[in-house]
Image (spheres, grey):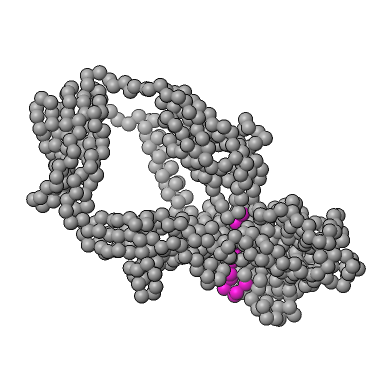
Amino acid sequence: MRGFSLGDILFLIFLFFSTIGITGLLYSDMSRLSQASNEKVIGTITFKQKVAQRKYTGQVVWENLEQSTELRNKDSIRTSQLSEAEITLNDGTKITLDENSMILLNINDGQTELDFAYGTLSTKQSGSDVSVADGNNATALKIKVGDKTINSEGDVNLSGSKDGSDMQLKLESGTASVSSTKGEEISVSKNEIAKIGGENLSVATQSIQLQLPTNLERKVIRDSKTQVNFQWIRNNTKNSNSKLPSNLIISSYPDLKSPWKVISTSDNQAKVDVPVGSHYFAVRLGTETTETRRFTIYQNAPVALNSPANGSKISTASNNSRVSFIWGKATVDTTYILEIANSQDMNSTSIVNRESLSANSFSKELSVGSYYWRIGTKDPIGDDIVYSKVYKFEIVREETLVTPQLMQPETKTKFALDEVQKSGLTFTWTGSKIADSYQFTLVHPKTGSAERESKSASIQWKENLDVGRYRWSVAAIRNNSKSEPSEIREFEIVQEAVTPVIEEAVLVPPSLVSPIQNSEIDMTQKDEIRFIWKTTNAKQSRLELAPANRLSQLILKLETNDNFYTFRELNKLEEGEFVWRVVSIHNNGQESISKDQKFRVVLNRGKGKLEFTSPKIYYVE
């Protein structure tokens, strides 16, 4: 045996110290996580839509949050695009984060402090429903924004971009003051707007004060649209000309571009039918426009039931069987209520099991019998529950042995001798729930019949395989009884390699099913786009996706054996038109291409056309 060389020794030393180093880093990271998780619980996530994440203090990794997740002191919270989260602190303060927003929670000596990084947030402090208007009973709240500090005893709305240049504060109730590290300080009164993003602080009183809907207000409905009451008040300022009509502008975009509804009215309110989705609105009076508010309408629609299918039968060898329940995801983050009953009316006396779940799947051990099941989705804001259809399934005890059904190899299949001698042959068939084993019979053309017992519904055979025609069959065994034997299938082993015969076929291009030509896909409350197509005589498909104005710049090029694909990389999409096509790759290597199909992606879009309501006056700055 030769000794270790100098290089071997140095390599072993390197591995030793590398292992110690990695172990130390892992221990350090786990220690920091343990320390962070030992921070005091200061609140919970009381509402979440799509993606909200938390990062512990001292950590670099963000983790996804779910509704009802506990939050700890010094947690950083952020939301992604088309996402939203509501935090309720232990003192009752509610903090709502709009999409693309981030804060850090910090409570020291009873003082609630938020480090606001970017985005939009709205706070509603405990006691604000009763007497916050005069500053009494409100919880003190400090918000740090760069080199500015906001001290508030009321409800505030704060918004701004990541660079903070356009940061502004709107005080809805109570009192607030803003100070800077330069020693500058201003007071902000109810319904005043303070601009705090520039070098200097400034505050202004608006001619119009928005009332309803409140900023970042949420509403959950069963239908696809609902009537929303918009209200505002005219203040007695030099700009408030009582003869001028005010203009309500509703858009699907934060900058109010492409408004889908404009109402010019002398009243201080308007009622509008608004579809599901996120919407932005403001009121304009002359050349002055209020701050922009956002509100969201979610639809709590019944979910689709997937498994067990309606009318399905589940076989079992005993008196019980574990049943997997699977259903579609709700359009809004919610609690699922699974109900299993022994009668179709699903009344309280017939329900045998009721579970509250956060995931859209669950498994349960049930005894032999007939069952009905449904899923309820709970309104995440209120108490309303919407139920799915009711599906029936049956758990059946298998009393007699079922004759196995042969699967592979198919009848009259040919195999090359050199391949089967190297790898053998795999035989498969359908199993029986109550079978103890299976008797596999192979009839050899030279040596005759050979039998082997298998505990599973498959077997690998390698012995005595030679050129010739073979027959095989299977029977199920339980105790000393045996089922009827299966059909007898034939296959052949040949001397030379088997070359598959490629039949000439007409190259039929794929037909695109969805998205359809010139369709518009509203991505509100969606996180995926599903592409579906049909092919003829194709062994594979290639899906291609590109912007309509840059066809050569593919954002997706994917080969698949399926006739569908679910696209979830929404960060690659912008609002606008896209073109997709499918290329069929045929057995002879040739390709056929579908027609191009165009569709439009819209984010945060409400439905409806731009509409001017009498009187026909619309003021543009």
Residue shown at 50% from the left, 41% from the top: 532
Q: Is residue 48 magenta?
A: no
Q: Position of residue 372 (x, y in %)?
A: 36, 64
- The front one of 421 and 537 is 537
Residue shown at 10% from the left, 25% from the top: 446
Image quarter of the C terminus: bottom right
User: Along the horizontal axis of the image, is 499 left or right of 275?
Assistant: left
Count of labels shown?
A: 0
Image quarter of the N terminus: top left
Q: Does the image show residue 184?
A: no
Q: Where on the picture, by quarter, is residue 111?
A: bottom right
Q: Position of residue 72 (x, y in %)?
A: 54, 65
- 370 shown above or below 593: below
Q: Position of residue 75 (x, y in %)?
A: 57, 62
* Residue at the top extreme of this rendering: 496
Residue shown at 25% from the left, 18% from the top: 496
Q: Does the image show residue 515?
A: yes
- 175 shown above or below 424: below
* Residue at the right extreme of this rendering: 238
Q: Where on the picture, by quarter, is residue 443?
A: top left
Q: Position of residue 309 (x, y in %)?
A: 37, 55
Q: Which residues are magenta?
A: 82-93
Q: Where on the picture, by quarter, is residue 211?
A: bottom right
Residue shown at 33% from the left, 64% from the top: 371
- 415 shown above or below 168: above
